[in-house]
Amino acid sequence: MDKKNILIVDDEINVCKSIGRAIQCEQYEVERALSGEEALDNLKEKTYHLVIADLMMPGIGGIDLLKSLRTSFPEINVIMITGYPTIKTAVQAIKIGAFDYIPKPFTPEQLRSVVARCFKSEDEKTEKEPPVTTMPKGIYYIIGHTWVIPEKNNKGLVGVVHDFLKTVGRITSLQLPNENDNVMQGEMCAKIKDDAGYNYGIWSPATGKVFEVNEKLKKDFSLLKKSPYKEGWLFRCELTQFEEDKESLLLSQ
Amino acid sequence: MYYVKQSFCKMALKQIYNRFLSLPLRAKFIISFLLVICFGGILTLIFGTRLEHKTIFSLAQDKVNHDLASARMVYNEKLFDIRDIVRLNSVRESIQNSLKTKQRETLFKHLSLIRKEFALDFLTVTDAEGKVVLRTSNPEIWGDDQSSDPVLQRALSGKTVASTQITPREDLIKEGKGLAEKAYIEFIPTPKAVPLEKDHEENAMVLKAAAPVMSEENEILGVLYAGIILNRNYEIVDKVKEIVFKGEMYKGREIGTATIFQQDLRISTNVKNENGKRAIGTRVSREVNQAVLNKGKIWVDRAFVVNNWYISAYEPIKNINGDIIGILYVGMLEKPYIDLRNRVMGTFAGMAVLSVIILLIILTVITSTIINPLKKLVVATNEIAKGDLDHKVSTNLKDEIGQLATSFNQMTDNLNKANQKLIHWGKTLEKQVNERTKKIKEMQDSLIQSEKLASLGKMAAGIAHEINNPLTSILINSHLLLEKADNPYVKESLDLITEETSRCSSIVKGLLEFSRQSPPKKVPADINSLITNTSALLENQLKFQNINVIKKLDSNLPHIKIDTSKIKQVIWNLMINAAEAMPNGGKITLSTRFSKDKKSVVIEITDTGKGIPQENINKLFDPFFTTKESGSGLGLAVSYGIIQQHQGHIKANSKVSQGTTFTVVLPIT
């Protein structure tokens, strides 16, 4: 297997170095650029498989870089990182076409799991596997993460979208919230660990209080991949500000 | 120069006008009315007297003209009397016979009787040649030729004639004794007369008549002529006075006068001088002299005669040849007319003065009805100015002044009320000031608090961004080291580093959340069930900490518009705070009620904890203020921000070692 070329773009050299150290291994060839302009120069000379870019940089910012990558190099995956995380910028980045979005600060493990997921999805693409399933209509979702189906009395059912699950290996462990736990949109609400040993944080699509957890899923993790929109749901919660939350969600057609 | 004069006039007028403006109202009224009355009065007086003067004097002149005609009649009558005497005697047989025979004694016997009877000055007979046969008044002198006399000449030619004539002194001497003396008049100096060289008059003005004496054969035998000297003869003038003026007197003076002038000399008159004597010897004025003697006109005008003003008429007296030889004059004393005019004018003026007085009285009364209420108003305003606001203006007038008084009273009423209010206000001012000061302090505090929050929000965003970058490096590298660490000592240190870095991360996250306070989404909600639900989440956990939750909720509260998730967060924060204040257990009381004015809902969360020292109460809602080891210091600041976004307020009351009460007030609408 060829080495994967990864380009890290951040205006702070120490952050670049640290990220490089966190993901450095035999399979990856890591390079860094200290600005959007430098990154674009690098991209002209060499083929990269992944770009990890900071959202806020002087000159060409992360979003601009992402946009030009989407048009010039649509095959390259991009992971956005930011020191000033908001759900709006996260959704914006993913809508434009980022693979994922990680708020600073993060642990090496969090980063590695996203990178691993990224390459797994790339492998799938190359293998031209048909998608496991498609998304049913009428579901509010965050691209590549989670969905929520509003129910009666301001309640909502929450689950993980199939695009996310494609990038994850066999699930070895699943950590769900407890009843009466509060969850917030864009915050981690569950964790998945796969057979590769990576931990994946799952963002909640809405804000509210959990009142029911899928007990079946706790016993059989495979339900998640088999039926991501039905038996594989995560939890039910009371939606406290769904009207506001909707602004950051997409509706499946 | 003209402009200077004009501007001076303007200035003077302006000064007068200004002085007028500064006069009292009554004076203004009276002066204005007087000006109008005087202007009208003077005009009427001027034109009235002119008219009256003209009327009276034209009447007087008509009368004097008429009187002159009467005087002429008297004069002519006398002349014709003499003519009749000579004619009647000339046809007497005895006279004819005596003259034929030249019997002078017989003639004298007949004629001297006649002369005496008719008071003739002379009665003389001549023969057919004009030679004197007999002078009855001077028989010694006869035989002289008189045929050159114009009157005689006409008689010698067979006519009976009569005329006025100037007879020279030598003829007078011949005609009779004493006649020349009678005619002799010395001039009395008269200032207005035409100056003359001679100082006396020796000739006489004579009324003369002559008739021819005829024979039976109708031949002229001679002439009979007679005459009366007018000098010092007052018969005619007195007769005129008697017939024309009927001897009327006015204040001791005769009204009517008549005079006969020989040339310009008074020879017969009843005009009296200062001594009461007839003013013989004075002469006529130059004016009359010119008009009557020279030009032969009738002259009618007022004239100063001797020592009084007369309305006079002069007419020339002519001799038989038509030459002017003297003047006939009549005059009415002007004084009665002047007095009449003055009386009329006096009456007129008196009436005017009387009307002015009456008008003034009326004016005073009328102005009083206007000015007295105004004076009252002035007195009232002075009283009010002195501070007597209870003063009232009494008036029963219904006009504008009455209205003014009414509105004035109303004004003072209002003023009084306002004053009372002011006094009352002054009394309560201190209290109000204290209340307001307290309110201002509260507002200021809240303003400071919100400013703190706002600037902190901005700062937090900046800080979070900057700090997250180094935190990323620290977190990644400490984790990488941890992955490689075998030494438990090193591992423990690295664990501490990663743990603290994570804590930093969560503090920054809290800051960011705080800086991103989104506007509240308000929906009507039941605050009691919101509190119950929030409390239910914590109650189980609190039981383990030996804390009881007691709820005293007013079930009558209405639904209020709130952002339920944010208010839940506040209740949550306050309950966690309360629990943390009671590490050894206690109770939390949750209560809801209406505010006193029923416009707000009051939520109170009371604990029985250690309390908060007074010096910390004010810092309680400051961001990063915390007394807990593990607190971020943002919980209460965030709560404060949320309540503020709901137009409510939050405050804390605490007593050390007794407990703390947090009060949240949310408006109902």
Image: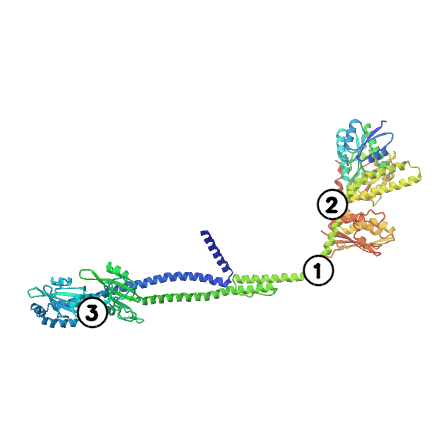
Q: Which element type, helix, strand or loop, lies under badge 2?
A: loop
- The residue carrying mark 3 is B181
Q: Position of residue B239 (x, y in %)?
A: 23, 69
Number of the front mark, 1 or 3 = 3
Give residue A12's quadrant in the image: top right
Looking at the picture, which amino acid does disc 2 mark?
Pro
Query: In the picture provided, is B145 more to the left or to the right than B23?
Result: left
Q: Residue at x 55, y 66 (%)?
A: B394
As measured in the structure, the alpha-carbon distance from the residue carrying label 3 to the one carrying label 2 is 152 Å
Number of the front mark, 1 or 2 = 1
Badge 1 and badge 2 both on one subunit = yes
Q: What chain is tagged by disc 2?
A: B
Give residue B142's quadrant in the image: bottom left
- The residue carrying mark 2 is B519
Sequence-earlier tag: 1 or 3: 3
Q: Which element type, helix, strand or loop, lies under badge 3?
A: helix
- Dot 1, crowdedness within 10 Å: few (<14), some or many (≥20)? few
Number of the front mark, 3 or 2 = 3
Badge 1 and badge 3 both on one subunit = yes
Q: Nearer the viewer, residue B230 or A2?
A: B230
Coloration mode: rainbow
Q: Nearer the viewer, residue B133 or B479?
A: B133
Sequence-earlier tag: 3 or 2: 3
Looking at the picture, which amino acid does disc 1 mark?
Glu
* Residue A186 in sight from this viewpoint: no
- Dot 2, crowdedness within 10 Å: few (<14), some or many (≥20)? few
- The residue carrying mark 1 is B430
Q: Nearer the viewer, residue A234 or B416?
A: B416
Looking at the picture, which amino acid does disc 3 mark?
Glu
